[in-house]
Image (cartoon, rainbow, N blue to C red):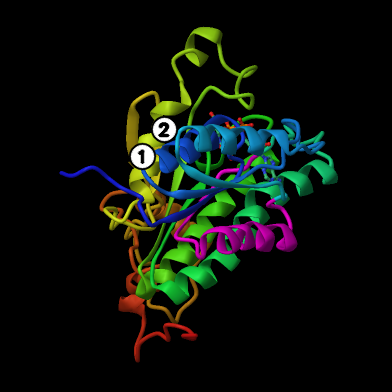
Amino acid sequence: MGEISFEGRVAIVTGAGAGLGKTYALELARRGAKVVVNDLGGARDGSGASSSAADQVVDEIKQAGGQAAPNYDSVATIEGGANIVKTAVDNFGKVDIVINNAGILRDKSIVKMEEQEWDLVMAVHLKGAFCVTQPAFKVMKANGYGRVVNTASGAGLYGNFGQINYSSAKMGVLGVMHSVHIEGAKYNIKANTIAPIAASRLTEDVMPPEIFAKLDPKFVTPLVIYLVSEENQDSDMIFNCAAGWFSRTAIMCAPGTIIGDGVGDISAEQVQEQWSKITSLDEAKVLTGGVNDSFGYLAPLMTGGLSTGPKK
Ligand code: NAI
């Protein structure tokens, strides 16, 4: 296997002024990519702004002989996303790679969560992924090439106390991934999602120091670099990664069971009777054809076939 190169590629890394994003930006540039280093430069809770975080990473890349341009927009608005992509196109002529990484925290238990904390976290993580990916997708589609990585979290995939806003936003980025995967397939645009665990300002007070010390962000970087490379041909996948652990996780659908004949009424008691079959994950599989694949399970109940929905 040859060395993975990003010569001729243009990458956008959001939230690249610190933590995980910084490692992606440095490594992409080291391997030849021209990198837009986006960072709002605010605090962990999303307040404030500063150009210094992005500037420092751009300086570091340039000092090492790489090419980079800073951008200080928030990912959380349509204008911000458009401007981030414009920075790539104006400076480097195109965009091949988007790593949606920018993130903040506003943790509260469900009963204490305020509307503003919900909205802000959704805006940065979920709307931000859309705001940056949409304009980038247009450029990628025109060029017939693209690689997108979104950042979820175990808190979204599996749940966590005190993070209803963050968990919901992080699950939401799977929707962004699915859409880019499905709508980008014929343009060689691939989208994947990572759920990392790494030492950063987001996690410094939530982990015991001895565990924090073992979670260097550099252990996540290689997976992300591979996923945004030309070599990677996989799309619509979700990965756990931390400290050298790499694992695929997935949303799966089990065949379950069929009750009734699709005409007569079904009772709650029949559902109760079949509960072990309904809840069984035996023979569950990933639906690689999107939601239309799930219609296949209904086939025995259907005559005349199902519409597969509008194609645009
Ligand atoms: P970090 O706080 O070190 O880096 C996040 C960067 O995003 C910061 O430099 C911040 O200024 C920037 N940012 C925040 N809001 C922004 C906005 N609106 N526009 C542009 N930039 C903005 O955090 P870390 O740990 O490196 O997190 C990176 C991503 O990984 C985040 O999406 C986070 O939710 C996710 N993640 C991290 C985990 C961890 O264990 N560190 C666990 C699971 C997910």
The numbered dot on residue 187 is: none
Q: Measured from the top left, where is residue 283 in percent x and y?
A: 25, 53
Residue type at mark 1: give it. Leu
Amino acid tagged 2: Val
Q: Residues within 10 Å of mark 1 (few under 14, many from 20)?
A: some
Give the quadrant of the N terminus: top left
Q: Residues within 10 Å of mark 2 (few under 14, many from 20)?
A: many
C-beta proximity under 8 Å, tags 2 and 1: yes
280, above or below 211, in the image: below
The residue wearing badge 1 is: 223
Which residue appears at 63% of the width and 32% of the height? 56
Query: Which span of residues is magenta-colored?
Result: 75-103
Label 2 secondary element: loop
Q: Position of residue 150 (x, y in %)?
A: 50, 50
- Residue 159 visible in the current orientation: no
Q: Quadrant of ligand 1?
A: top right
Q: Does residue 257 show up magenta in the picture?
A: no
Is 112 drawn above or below residue 145 in the view shown? Answer: above
Please provide percent x and percent y for residue 206.
62, 19
Give the side of residue 289 with respect to residue 135, left or right. Answer: left
Please give the residue where the numbered disc 2 appears in the rendered image.
220
Mark 1, secondary structure of its residue: helix
**Residue at 44% from the left image edge and 60% from the top image edge:** 96
In the displayed structure, would residue 205 be above or below residue 4? above
Q: Residue at x 33, y 37 (%)?
A: 247
